Amino acid sequence: MPSPFPGMNPYLEQADVWHDFHERFMPMVAERIADQVDPRYIVKIDEHVFIQEFSSEQRRLIGRADVSLSRVASHADVGAEPGAAVCEAPAEGYVPAMDSERLAFVEIRDRRDRQLVTLIELLSPANKRPGGDRDQYLAKRHEVLRSTAHLVEIDLLRGGQRPPLEQLPPCDYYVMISRSQQRPRVGLWPLRLRDRLPVVPIPLREPDPDAQLDLQQVLHDIYDKARYATYIYEGSPTPPLNPDDEAWATGQIA
């Protein structure tokens, strides 16, 4: 069963749904492209690893328990003379709570020299939230934009702070394609909530023709395989829709 929305499904933007969608999206993209570019190119999946620190208050809010270890006798305890005092720490503190998030991306590499030809990224909240994770993504983005590789950047999240992108018209979502030979100019597909997701070109090395990626069909196939219809409508889109779009979205679900 395809998604009931003609374009992006805003219920996929919920925190407890998005990561699953992201991790299903990239392998399906890789599969669709590999069928078109074999044997000239290799299509690979790799991961960004974002390391996050949480304060004690954030630890409490997200429900992560602190690590607790039962006390065991130390060498000093074992060798201590009877009646000798055991030194206990006069204060207690915490080291920062660490968490990691792995986010997949797709690489197209030349089979002959293994050089990166095209990088395909689907943005996630970590890329759009101020802090170290966003800085890490922007550094990788800058590195690619200074190279001879093409960049395909897909943003299907309404929330958060977008990466720097000049002259993007008002929109809810977008696709940006930066061809190495045309920089700093880029191709833009600005999208509203009710727009069909586009079929976009995936650039390769000249003179090879572009591959084609139907983003809407990818979304429909994931929606069906993941059985999203059985649970995502129990929540609400994040961030909330405006009243007109909320009424329209409710009608689409019905």
Image (cartoon, helix red, strand yellow):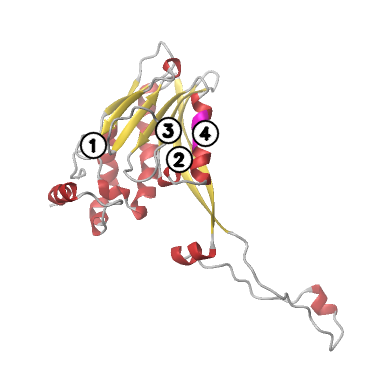
Mark 3, residue position: 164
In front here: 235 or 225? Answer: 235
Q: Which residue is mark 4?
A: 140
Q: Which residues are magenta?
A: 138-142
Q: Which mark is residue 192?
A: 1
Q: Which mark is residue 204?
A: none
N-terminal of the pair, mark 1 or mark 3, is 3
How far across and down, in percent of the image, does residue 41 sit?
45, 22
Separation (CA) of disc 3 from disc 4: 13 Å
- Whether label 3 touches label 4, CB < 8 Å: no
Q: Which residue is mark 2?
A: 104
Q: Quadrant of residue 24?
A: top left
Decide if residue 72 is in sight here: yes
Amino acid type at mark 3: Pro
Residue 174 lies in quadrant? top left
Q: CA distance from mark 4 to mark 1?
A: 27 Å
Query: How far apart, in angstroms, are the residues tagged by discs 1 and 2?
Result: 25 Å
Mark 4 residue element:
helix
Mark 1, residues whose alpha carbon is within 10 Å: few (<14), some, or many (≥20)?
some
| 4 or 1: tag closer to the N-terminus | 4
